[in-house]
Image (cartoon, rainbow, N blue to C red):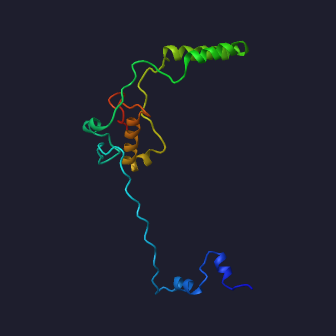
Amino acid sequence: MVHIGNGRVSLGFPHSWDIVQTWMDPSSHILFPEPPVVPEPTKKCPDVPRLGSYRLPPDPAFWKKFPTSKLPSHPSSLINYRHLREIINWFRPSLTMGQAIRADKVLHDLQHGSTVPFTADLPEARIPNTPSVMANGESFTDTLAWWVRQGKIDVNPEICGFMKSQ
């Protein structure tokens, strides 16, 4: 047995035609559901002050509250230099000359640090999602501060003009 209303339901309409007629009646009142209440996210670093604008550089008082991390006094790496050297030496007979030169350069840089051939300060970064960061500045700042506190990133705003770009 086929029900007449099944075609409407398969198209996404209600089974009852009365509901559809109510939609088309300009004198009827359509009840829209209330949008869900989205709770305000809990800040992970409530001591970091909220800025009035995230488009302008913050004043020095802001940076006194922002967490910092000390830069390491010497180069460090998670790579086990001695173990990598053993692996490279084991494979060295099968490396091309170019591969061997690059491997030696990597070993040298891991042991002594790498030179960076910059002759001037780097320009400010222009990133495509900057408008999103500015619109969500408080959340972004809170996340950045939290990552610094967890040791996931190292940030020292007093060096290199950190956060001076607009």
Q: Nearer the viewer, residue 5 or 44?
A: 44
Q: Position of residue 161 (x, y in %)?
A: 35, 31
Q: Is residue 1 above or below residue 35?
A: below
Q: Is residue 16 above or below residue 159?
A: below
Q: Is residue 139 above or below residue 102?
A: below
From where the camera sits, is residue 146 visible? yes
Quarter where residue 123 is shown: top left
Q: How many marks?
A: 0
Residue furthest out toward the left: 61
Quarter where residue 91 is shown: top right
Please indicate whether residue 73 sits to the left or right of residue 64 in the image. Answer: right
Q: Is residue 6 above or below residue 145?
A: below
Residue positioned 68% across, 80% down in the render? 7
Q: Position of residue 47 (x, y in %)?
A: 29, 43
Q: Position of residue 28 (x, y in %)?
A: 47, 86
Please indicate whether residue 48 sits to the left or right of residue 132 in the image. Answer: left
Quarter where residue 58 is shown: top left
Please indicate whether residue 5 sits to the left or right of residue 138 in the image. Answer: right
Q: Nearer the viewer, residue 166 or 19?
A: 19
